[in-house]
Amino acid sequence: SCLLPFLEYSKTVSEETVIKKMQQCFFEATAFIKDQILIAYDASLTVKQAENDSQLRDWIADRFFKKVDLKVAVQIPCHLKILKQDKSLYEFVRLLPLKSVVELKSTCCGFGGSKGFEKKWAKHAEKIGQSLLEEILTARPDVIVSPCITWRFQIRNLLSEKTLFSESEDLHNLIFSKNAHSNKILVVHPLILASQMLK
């Protein structure tokens, strides 16, 4: 989402043709990595074309990722919708060899960008986020992924989960530690999840 103001500002200082050329150089990180994985797959001469998603995921798992027995919920943030890349995040997470992946439908957490940090807005933001919280508690995922930091902040708050800067460590413990707390729902960036699954 940080690139959105930059793209908007560039309209005031650059010509339309320059802006269009610049926009071709911007990618949302998970969309970029998903495309690179698929390019690697297409470039491989040692495998036949996958007949279905399961075979494709098996090839990706064999090449890049450890299989992990986690149920993961995916939140599509507002900025991906604006960039028209809302499908890319879900597609990226579905490429990972996980137990199951579910897309959250109640995407608005109510935080409203930086507004959620304002005391006068906080209670209203929590009220808006209640339907999303109910969906999460019904889905009962082990992990929720979202590239939106304010969304992750709000959901941790609604789940009464206070850790903010130990996403990688907490996820590593959940995946690899026998003493991990199974009743805890972790909220992490999707690239943190992918990095912990790398072979």
Image (tube, helix red, strand yellow):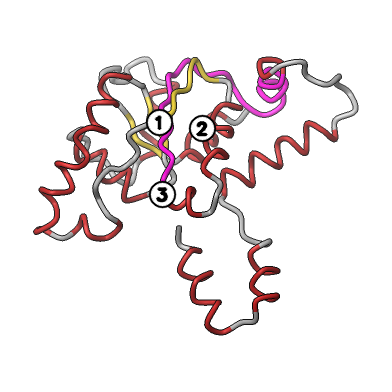
Q: Position of residue 179 (x, y in %)?
A: 32, 17
The residue at the point 67 percent across, 29 percent down is 64
Residue 6 position in % (x across, y down): 50, 71
Q: CA distance from mark 2 to mark 3?
A: 25 Å
Which comes before the other along the chain, label 1 or label 3?
Answer: 3
Q: What amino acid type should be assigned to the residue bearing mark 3?
A: Cys
54 over 134 or under it: above or below: above
Mark 1 and mark 2: Cα distance apart in space: 7 Å
Q: Which mark is residue 27?
A: none
Q: Is residue 193 above or below residue 20?
A: above
Question: Which numbered circle lies on residue 171?
Answer: 1
Residue under label 3, please give it: 78
Q: Which residue is mark 2?
A: 196
Span shown in magenta: 56-78
Amino acid type assigned to the residue bearing label 2 in the image: Gln
Residue 164, given in percent of the width and then of the height, sits at: 29, 45
At mark 1, the secondary structure is helix
